Image: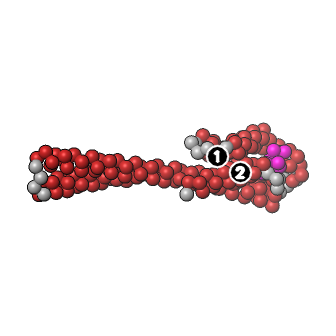
């Protein structure tokens, strides 16, 4: 993006010099007196500089908005991937109903904590919903650290597994998952913001 901005600035400077040369040539070949030539050159140079400045501001603003839109789109894609991982974990846990699947899927979700922390710390303001999603993932991580050994001994006793890991049951396995709701809200807020920037 920086290369394109530099090339654009160079192009605008060249355009200004071309305007200046045309004004000087017109003044010289139009047989104007020296004083009039200087006035014409000054007027053409001032007009060129003003034109180049205004075009430069417009181009810079356009490039800045495009860069912000790219960043927000990347955050939206990442949030969508995280939400899909949570949905898949929920599906697999409730389908397999085993300690092994709970352990594997919870481990995968715990690995999302740094990713969601990076998104939360990014300069993209998407509200408290993402902070809530981060808090939910961190509580899953704490539960995993505390209970994974206990769950491993339960095999396929799904009801006991659910009783042993209430945070997982609420945040992942539930149809009313607050984690998914927080991710959905974050994605909705970011989509609204992107539509405003369109």
Q: Residue at x 13, y 45 (%)?
A: 35
Which residue is depicted at the point 69% across and 57% down? Answer: 84
Q: CA distance from mark 1 to mark 2?
A: 9 Å
Range shown magenta: 166-172
Left/right of residue 36 with respect to residue 93 in the rendered view: left
Q: Residues within 10 Å of mark 1 (few under 14, many from 20)?
A: many
In the visual, does 86 lie left or right of 46? right
Element on which disc 2 rests: helix
Q: How far across and down, in percent of the image, does residue 1 sit?
A: 41, 52
Q: Residue furthest bottom?
A: 95
Name the main secondary structure of what is drawn in magenta: helix
Question: Residue 164 is drawn in which quadrant?
Answer: top right
Q: How is the image coloured?
A: secondary structure
Question: Where does residue 122 sit, x and y in percent of width and height?
Answer: 58, 42
Depth order, front residue of 123/158: 123
The residue where tag 1 is placed is 126
Res. 185 mark: 2
Q: Which mark is residue 176?
A: none
Q: Which corner quadrant of the image does residue 143 belong to?
A: top right
Compared across the picture, whether 80 is left or right of 62 comes to right
- Residue 74 shows in the view: no
The local secondary structure at tag 1 comes to loop
Q: Quadrant of the C terminus?
A: bottom right
How many callouts does the rendering have? Answer: 2
Q: Position of residue 160 (x, y in %)?
A: 89, 49
What residue is rendered at 82% in x and 48% in y?
170
Q: Is residue 21 magenta?
A: no
In the image, residue 1 sits, relative to residue 146, either above or below, namely below
Q: Does label 1 or label 2 sit earlier along the sequence?
A: 1
Nearer to us in this view, 130 or 68: 68
Above or below — where is 123 with respect to 185? above
């Amino acid at each position: 993006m920086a290369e394109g901005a530099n090339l654009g600035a160079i192009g605008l400077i060249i355009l200004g010099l071309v305007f200046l040369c045309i004004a000087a040539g017109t003044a010289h070949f139009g047989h104007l007196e020296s004083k009039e030539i200087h006035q014409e050159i000054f007027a053409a140079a001032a007009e060129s500089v003003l034109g180049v400045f205004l075009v430069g501001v417009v181009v810079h603003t356009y490039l800045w908005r495009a860069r912000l839109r790219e960043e927000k789109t990347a955050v939206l894609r990442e949030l969508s991937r995280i939400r899909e991982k949570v949905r898949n974990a929920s599906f697999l846990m409730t389908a397999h109903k085993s300690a092994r699947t709970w352990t594997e899927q919870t481990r995968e979700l715990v690995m999302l904590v740094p990713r969601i922390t990076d998104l939360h710390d990014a300069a993209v303001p998407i509200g408290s919903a993402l902070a809530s999603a981060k808090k939910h993932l961190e509580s899953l991580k704490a539960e995993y650290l505390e209970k994974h050994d206990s769950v491993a001994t339960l095999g396929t006793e799904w009801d006991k597994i659910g009783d042993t890991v209430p945070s997982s049951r609420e945040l992942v396995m539930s149809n009313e998952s607050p984690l998914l709701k927080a991710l959905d809200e974050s994605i909705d807020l970011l989509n609204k913001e992107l539509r405003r920037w369109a």
